[in-house]
Image (cartoon, grey):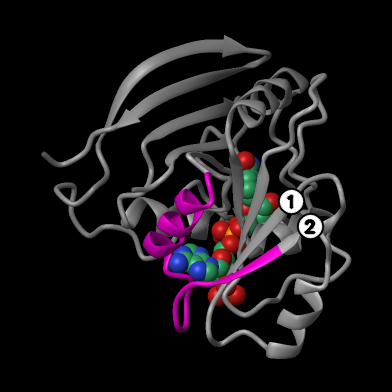
Amino acid sequence: MKPYVISNVGMSLDGKLATVGGDSRISCEEDLIRVHKIREKVDGIMVGIGTVLKDNPRLTVHKIKSNKNPVRIVVDSKLRIPLNARVLNKEAKTIIATTEKADKEKLKELSKIENVEVIICGKEKVDLKKLMEELYKRGIKSILLEGGGTLNWGMFKEGLVDEVSVYIAPMIFGGKAVSYVDGEGFKTVDEAVKLELKNFYRLGEGIVLEFKVKKDE
Ligand SMILES: NC(=O)c1ccc[n+]([C@@H]2O[C@H](COP(=O)([O-])OP(=O)(O)OC[C@H]3O[C@@H](n4cnc5c(N)ncnc54)[C@H](OP(=O)(O)O)[C@@H]3O)[C@@H](O)[C@H]2O)c1
C-alpha cells in the first residue's frame, strides 16, 4: 500500500520552476493560499534535498488559518540537510529519507532533534517505492509532492504520482533552468506519463490545471 500522491508546482509558461538564476518567486498570493489549502488536507508534504538547499522552505500551513501541520518529508540520500534548515524547526514533525551511504555522525545528530525521524531507504539513492510503503505504515495516507524537478522525475518514473495540479504563471523564463520534471526523461511518447484533464480555472493572472494520472490497467 502507498499514499495517494498529488504533485503540485508553480511554473512559468515554458515549464520552469525557477529562473536560470534560481529565482522561484512564481506563485501569486492567491496561488500560495491554494497550495496551503491542499497542504492542510494531506498527511505529508514532500520535497527533494535540492529544494531545501536552494529555498530553505518551512513547509508548514501558514498562509491560511489552521491548526494542522502535515509531516514534512525530505528525500536526501547523503544527509546533506543543514542542521539549521527551517524544515527542521519545531513547527511540525519531519521525516528525512536517506540511504546506507549517509554519514553516521550526521544521522546521529539529526536523530537527536526532538521532532525528526530518519528512515534509511535504499543503498545509493532513496528507494522511492520503499519509502512510500514506509510512510504508509506510519499512517501517511496522502502526500503533497512539492518538487523540485529531479524528485518529480523520480516519482513520475516510478509511477508513484496519482494527481497533478499546476499553477502556470504568465511568464517565460527560458534557458536551462530547473523544469517541472527533469531527470533523464522518457525516450518515446509511448513511455510518457499520461494524464486526464479534470479541471482548470483562472487564478490571479495565471491558470490552474488539474489532472488525474492515467494508470496502466
Ligand atoms: N516553483 C515551484 O513550485 C518549485 C517547487 C520546488 C522546487 N522548486 C525549485 O526547484 C529547484 C530544486 O530542484 P532540484 O531538481 O534541483 O532538486 P530536488 O528535486 O528538490 O531534489 C533532488 C535531489 O533529491 C535527491 N534524491 C534522493 N533520492 C532521489 C530519487 N530517488 N529520485 C530523485 N531525487 C532523489 C537527490 O540528491 P541526493 O542524491 O543528494 O539525495 C537529488 O539531487 C530549486 O531551484 C527550487 O527553487 C520550485
Label 1 element class: loop
- Judge whether 210 appears above or below 148 on screen: above
The residue that appears at 32% across and 56% down in the rendered structure is 157
Front residue of 32/59: it is 59
Give me the residue at 85% from left, 45% from top: 91
Residue that carries the numbered disc 2 in the rendered image: 115
User: SS of the residue at dot 2?
Assistant: loop
Image location of residue 8, percent across then percent down = 54, 36
Residue 118 vertical position relative to residue 88 in the rendered view, above or below: below
Of the image marks 1 and 2, the number of the one nearer the N terminus: 1
* Boundaries of the magenta span: 117-139
CB contact under 8 Å: marks 1 and 2: yes
Amino acid carrying mark 2 in the image: Asn
Q: Is residue 125 magenta?
A: yes
Q: Residues within 10 Å of mark 2 (few under 14, many from 20)?
A: some
Residue 199 placement (x, y as % from top left)? 41, 14
Q: Which mark is residue 125?
A: none
What's the residue at 59%, 49% (across, down)?
46
Q: Position of residue 181 (x, y in %)?
A: 45, 51
- For the point 52% across and 54% down, the residue is 149
The stretch drawn in magenta includes residue 134: yes
Q: CA distance from mark 1 to mark 2?
A: 5 Å
Quarter, ligand 1:
bottom right
Direction left: furthest residue: 217
Query: Which quadrant does the C terminus fall into?
Result: top left
Vertical relation: 43 (above or below) 72: above
The relative height of residue 121 versus residue 10 in the rendered view (above or below) is below
Query: Can residue 24 be spotted in the picture?
Result: yes
Residue identified by numbered label 1: 93
Single out the residue that lies furthest toward the top.
201
Is 67 or 79 nearer to us in this picture? 67
